[in-house]
Image (cartoon, grey):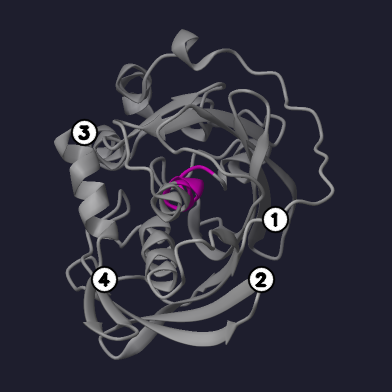
Amino acid sequence: MGPALDGLLALLDLEQIERDIFRGRSRASVTGRVFGGQVAAQALAAAGRTVPGDRPAHSLHAYFLRPGDAAAPVVYTVDRIRDGRSFTSRRVVAVQHGEPVFHLSASFQVPEEGLEHRTGMPDAPDPESLPTAAETLPAFAADFVRPGVVERLLRSREAVDLRYVNPPPYGAVGTPRPPRSQVWFRAHGELPDTPLLHACLVTYVSDMTLLDPVLLAHGRGGWAVGDVVGASLDHAMWFHRPLRADEWLLYDQESPASAGGRGLAQGRVWTRDGELAVSVVQEGVIRVPR
């Protein structure tokens, strides 16, 4: 593993303060606030630390309540809602400066056999045929209104190899496109065989690009271009099958609707061999500056 991935894993290695209280370090995202995917991944890690290791996460439902302060740690308090024979439920509240900034409910399940089906995996080019972020992002530098955007975007993706199948929103500002986006991603290095860690890494990445289809539908470039103001509101994930975050995963995303200053996005994470591993839904604030 490289230093960037080591740093991300260190963020997920929470300090245990009490039996069900954990503390996580923070770092600034490309927007200057704490990245929502970081808080969601840390909260899932905190919940998982209180669950037997034979019960992987199967779902989470979360609300982003306040912007996170990148200069302060985040304290996670876990409430042991239920420990059943098959399912375990946890509730996590993330606090900074005495106020809740994030709330998560997560469920874990003993693996079992049952009915199985899935839809077909969408078509996408092989990830090796696509340019890396370091090769793609500098081409859009002229569109960015904030200084240092390319460098900040690249730093935010150092731990993850993320490759766009189609140009990102800031790659075609002013031209509405179908509200759909695809990216391949994997961790920049081999990870331990710990299912919770892989689920946390996918949770971290799941918040990086999910609102892109909303922007694409309106030809908006996002915060980097300065033509919208946005933030995640809520986030839900269902883990259908085991996966590895250090192997290529296709993140297929679309937006069915936007209204009321909000945009809804849906995502599906596929393994390279065509298995649907995760479903994701998020709504975010999408406002046009006045």
Q: Is residue 187 left or right of residue 65?
A: left
Whether residue 30 is situated above or below residue 64 in the rendered picture: above
Please state which amino acid type lies under the numbered disc 4.
Asp
- Dot placed on the residue nearer the N-terminal end, 1 or 3: 3
Marks 3 and 4 sit apart, C-alpha to C-alpha, by 28 Å
Magenta span: helix, strand or loop, mainly?
A: helix
Marks 2 and 1 sit apart, C-alpha to C-alpha, by 9 Å
Asked if marks 1 and 3 touch (Cβ < 8 Å), the reply is no
Q: Which residue is mark 3?
A: 1
Q: Which residue is mark 4?
A: 69
Mark 1: give few (<14), some (14-19) or many (20+) Cα within 10 Å.
few
Please state which amino acid type lies under the numbered disc 3.
Met
Q: Nearer the viewer, residue 71 or 53?
A: 53
Region rendered in magenta: 202-209
Q: Nearer the viewer, residue 258 or 125?
A: 125
Q: Is residue 154 left or right of residue 54?
A: left
Front: mark 4 or 2: 2
Q: Which residue is mark 1?
A: 112
- Dot placed on the residue nearer the N-terminal end, 4 or 1: 4
Q: Secondary structure at mark 4?
A: loop
**Residue 287 falls in image quadrant:** bottom right
Q: Residue 86, labelled with which disc?
A: 2
Mark 3: give few (<14), some (14-19) or many (20+) Cα within 10 Å.
few
Q: Give coordinates of residue 69: x percent, y percent.
A: 26, 71
- Dot placed on the residue nearer the N-terminal end, 2 or 1: 2
